[in-house]
Each structure stands twice: as structure tokens, then as C-alpha cells.
Image: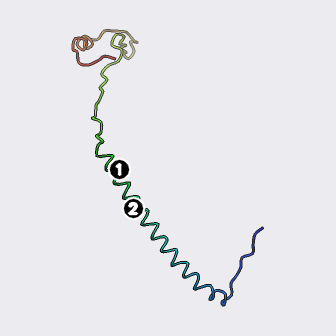
Amino acid sequence: MFKKKRVLTHQQAASLLPSIESFNQMASVMIDLLNKKIDAQQKRLRTISHVVNADYTPPSTHSISVSMIDIANTKVTKTGKGVTQANITWEDEVRRQQRGFIL
């Protein structure tokens, strides 16, 4: 199943050395070509990204401020006195001012 690791003699290694060196030279040329191709693709993508983003405007920022919830049934709690339901004075003022929606 597993092949035994082969050890080369000095003569065999010396005879293979020129072919290994030429292989390394060809591999380095191939790597350079692939790197140039990758750089060209990245440059193309950056150009496309700039063109697409030129028309893009970010949405304007909006904020929602929630002041109160369920004004009709306000529960007032006091320590030691329990829970009561009461109509607090600021609720009347908010109903008279028409400053947005009451959720």
C-alpha cells in the first residue's frame, strides 16, 4: 500500500539536478504569468467596483424616537404602596401636541 521512500545516490541526484533546475525556472515563469493575470483581474474588478459605486448614493439617515408606549394604561408604582393606574399630566400635553405618531 505505501511505497518505500526512495533515496537517491549522489550520481542519480547529480544527473537529475539540471532537469530540476529547468523545471524550477519554468515554474517561476508560470507563477509570474499567473500573478500578472491575477493583478489584471483585480484591476478590472476595481474598475467595475468604481463604476458601480459611482451611481450609488447611501440612504439618508433617519431616526425614530419612541417617547411613550400605551399612554392610556399607565401604571404607576410606588415602593410599599402597590401599583395604581393613573393618567399622568404629561400625557395630556403629548396628546395636544401633534408631533408625530403615538404607537
The x, y position of residue 91, in whole percent, is: 27, 13
Q: Residues within 10 Å of mark 1 (few under 14, many from 20)?
A: few
Q: Is residue 76 above or below residue 3?
A: above
Instruction: Using the image, tell me which numbered label, if any, was put on residue 49.
Output: 1
Q: Nearer the viewer, residue 84 or 100?
A: 100
The residue under the point 23% across, 18% down is 99
The residue under the point 40% across, 12% down is 83
Amino acid type of the residue tagged 1 in the rendering? Ser
The residue under the point 30% across, 36% down is 59
The x, y position of residue 36, in whole percent, is: 42, 66
Q: Are marks 1 and 2 in contact (CB under 8 Å)?
A: no
The x, y position of residue 7, in whole percent, is: 70, 82
Indicate which disc, 1 or 2, sits on the residue closer to the N terminus.
2
Q: Is residue 74 above or below residue 45?
A: above
Instruction: Determine the secondary structure under disc 2.
Output: helix
Q: Is residue 54 above or below residue 17?
A: above
Q: Nearer the viewer, residue 28 or 59?
A: 28
Amino acid type of the residue tagged 2 in the rendering? Ala
Q: Which residue is mark 2?
A: 40
